[in-house]
């Protein structure tokens, strides 16, 4: 008679698997197994949240707009009105994030000049568009903080009061314009490693937030993430009406590799950020900057105006327009503001390189 076969049971299977996967493993092998199990659990949970977010918002209308900064067009020696009109007429953009630089509109104490913002509001309103207005000291484009010299020479306690006065002038001037749909306060306020900014105190941000709300509580007030890191999860004060995320895919790494670096993050990573934000705070998310321009290395003998095209296209070129737009759309976030359109226009008009502009025009038409 042969040996009796072992009786099958789930306990027997678990015993065999446990012996194979655990009992006969070394200490470091066990550590690796635990780490892999934790990584799988975290990744699958994050993906589950991302998938939920994408499905939850898939039927909402998609809005693709752009940031417009008149000073950036002047950097390229171009007329701001011409560039904005081309963005409206040729690219068909109808959503714009505008800036309200303090040093531009109050160059001297109590001397206000909003003529530049006025014509932007008028042009976009005439086109049937909508505006997200940046407020505060820190707003898009270098040096990030745009305070007038007369104010920045004062202690922080004093210029903070001046900033609130300027903010009140700005909000009160435009809050009755229907074309204005939202505010964005202190762009990436806690990003201390980038920009020339004198103060990053949460107390000031909260005070500004409450102050803007006291002036106009009829529109969403957005606070943008500092970066993609978990510490910027928007669970602290101020509790914004919506959260902005910046999406930069390919950049110049000045810290370690000293070369162009592509973030290996899948598009659903931003779905996870948006979904996690919505589940934990109850507020929606937007992409306030989708990188659509080059990121040059530092200390080069040229800049964005005259760099060789092949150097510029290392981080963003015509071949990346469609995939970058698709990357943003695949995140499931339904409001996306493009970053760098002024530069496309300079390439087209000044450097006889219209490929990015023309490709983007065709791609944007598909999404409309």
Image (cartoon, grey):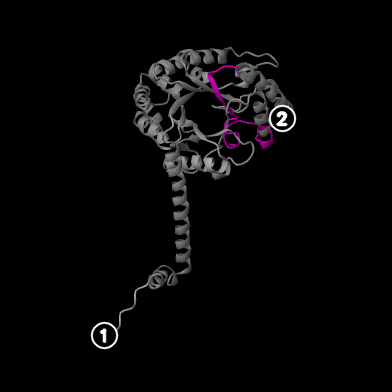
Question: Picture coordinates of residue 27 (x, y %)?
Answer: 48, 68
Q: Are marks 1 and 2 in contact (CB under 8 Å)?
A: no
- Of residues 347 and 363, the one drawn nearer to the viewer in this rendering: 363
Question: Picture coordinates of residue 90 (x, y %)?
Answer: 39, 17
Main secondary structure along the magenta-highlighted residues: loop
Q: Would residue 302 be seen by someone viewing this image from the given angle? A: no
| Front of the two marks 1 and 2 | 1
Looking at marks 1 and 2 on the same chain, the residue that comes earlier in the sequence is marked by 1
- Of residues 243 and 186, the one drawn nearer to the viewer in this rendering: 243
Crowding near pointer 1: few (<14 within 10 Å), some, many (20+)? Answer: few
Q: Which mark is residue 181?
A: none
Report which residue position mark 2 lands on.
156
Dot 1 lies on which element?
Answer: loop
Q: Quadrant of the C terminus?
A: top left
Question: Picture coordinates of residue 51 (x, y %)?
Answer: 43, 44
Q: Tell me, yes or no, whether the highlighted magenta stretch contains residue 193.
A: yes
The magenta segment:
176-205
Report which residue position mark 1 lands on.
2
Is the residue 42 above or below the residue 308 in the image? below
Q: Would residue 287 be seen by someone viewing this image from the given angle? A: yes
Q: Quadrant of residue 87?
A: top left
């Amino acid at each position: 008679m042969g040996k009796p076969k072992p009786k099958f049971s789930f306990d027997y299977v678990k015993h065999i698997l446990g012996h194979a996967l655990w009992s006969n493993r070394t200490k470091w092998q066990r550590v690796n197994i635990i780490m892999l199990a934790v990584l799988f659990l975290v990744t699958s949970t994050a993906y589950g949240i991302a998938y939920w977010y994408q499905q939850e918002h898939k039927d909402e209308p998609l809005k693709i707009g752009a940031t417009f900064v008149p000073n950036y067009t002047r950097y390229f020696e171009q007329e701001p009105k011409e560039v904005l009109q081309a963005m409206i007429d040729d690219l068909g953009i109808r959503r714009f994030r505008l800036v309200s630089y303090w040093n531009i509109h109050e160059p001297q104490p109590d001397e206000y000049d909003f003529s530049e913002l006025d014509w932007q509001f008028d042009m976009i309103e005439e086109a049937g568009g909508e505006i997200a207005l940046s407020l505060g000291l820190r707003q898009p484009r270098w040096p990030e903080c745009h305070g007038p010299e007369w104010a920045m020479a004062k202690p922080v306690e004093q210029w903070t009061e001046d900033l609130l006065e300027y903010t009140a002038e700005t909000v009160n001037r435009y809050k009755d314009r229907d074309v204005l749909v939202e505010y964005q306060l202190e762009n990436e306020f806690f990003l201390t490693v980038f920009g020339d900014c004198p103060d990053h105190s949460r107390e000031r941000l909260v005070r500004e937030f409450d102050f803007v709300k006291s002036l106009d509580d009829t529109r969403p007030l957005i606070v943008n993430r500092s970066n993609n890191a978990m510490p910027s999860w928007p669970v602290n004060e101020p509790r914004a009406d919506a959260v902005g995320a910046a999406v930069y895919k390919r950049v110049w790494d000045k810290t370690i590799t000293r070369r162009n670096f592509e973030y290996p993050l899948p598009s659903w990573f931003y779905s996870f950020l948006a979904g996690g934000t919505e589940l934990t705070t109850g507020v929606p998310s937007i992409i306030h900057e989708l990188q659509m321009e080059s990121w040059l290395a530092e200390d080069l003998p040229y800049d964005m105006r005259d760099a060789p095209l092949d150097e510029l296209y290392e981080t963003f070129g015509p071949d990346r327009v469609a995939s970058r737009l698709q990357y943003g759309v695949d995140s499931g976030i339904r409001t996306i503001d493009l970053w760098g359109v002024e530069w496309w226009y300079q390439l087209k008009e000044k450097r006889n390189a219209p490929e990015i502009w023309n490709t983007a025009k065709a791609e944007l038409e598909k999404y409309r």
